Amino acid sequence: MRSLEICWTMPRSGVISRYRSVWFGLKKEKSAKFSLLLQIEDDGPGIPEAKLVEILQRGVRADEHMQGHGIGMAVVSELTALLGGQLSASTSETLGGMKWQVYLP
C-alpha cells in the first residue's frame, strides 16, 4: 500500500499542474536489489543540485512562488526509505527538467 502512496504523491508534488510535458512510468526492474521502478520527468526548469537535499525535508519547497506545503517529496523520500528503496534525482534527458526515480524492492 505504501508504494501506491508514492505513486500518488510523486506526480502531485506540484509537477503536473506546472509544466506542459510530464512523463510518468512504472516498470518492473530486473535487478537483485530492486523489483520496481517509478519514474517521473518534466520539462520544467529543474532544481539546483544544492537544493535537492533541502526539498526532501518537510516544509521546504523547490518553488516558493507556487502554493503548497513542501511535504510532497519529503513524504516520497520517507516512504521510499521505509520500504527499503532508493530515491534518485537527475536531469531528464528527454524533457530537460527534473527526473525522479524511486527504486523499490
Image: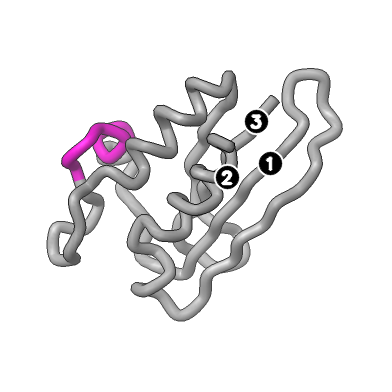
- Please tell me which residue lies in front, 76 or 44: 76
**Per the image, is 58 magenta?**
yes
| Quarter that holds the N terminus | top right
Say which residue appears at 14% left-offset and 58% top-offset: 64
Q: Which residue is the site of mark 3?
A: 104
Q: Where 12 falls versus 5 (above or below)? A: below
Q: Are marks 1 and 3 in contact (CB under 8 Å)?
A: yes
Does label 1 or label 2 sit earlier along the sequence? 2
For residue 1, side relative to residue 26 (left or right): left
Hey, what amino acid is under mark 2? Answer: Leu
| Quarter that holds the C terminus | top right
Q: Which residue is the site of mark 2?
A: 4
How far separated are the C-alphas under marks 1 and 3? 6 Å
In front of the other: label 1 or label 2? 2
In front of the other: label 2 or label 3? 2
Q: For the magenta stretch, what is the residue range?
A: 53-60
How far separated are the C-alphas under marks 1 and 2? 12 Å
Does label 2 or label 3 sit earlier along the sequence? 2
Residue at far right of view: 30
Q: Which residue is the site of mark 1?
A: 37
- Please tell me which residue lies in front, 89 or 10: 10
Hey, what amino acid is under mark 3? Answer: Leu
Does label 1 or label 3 sit earlier along the sequence? 1
How far separated are the C-alphas under marks 2 and 3? 11 Å
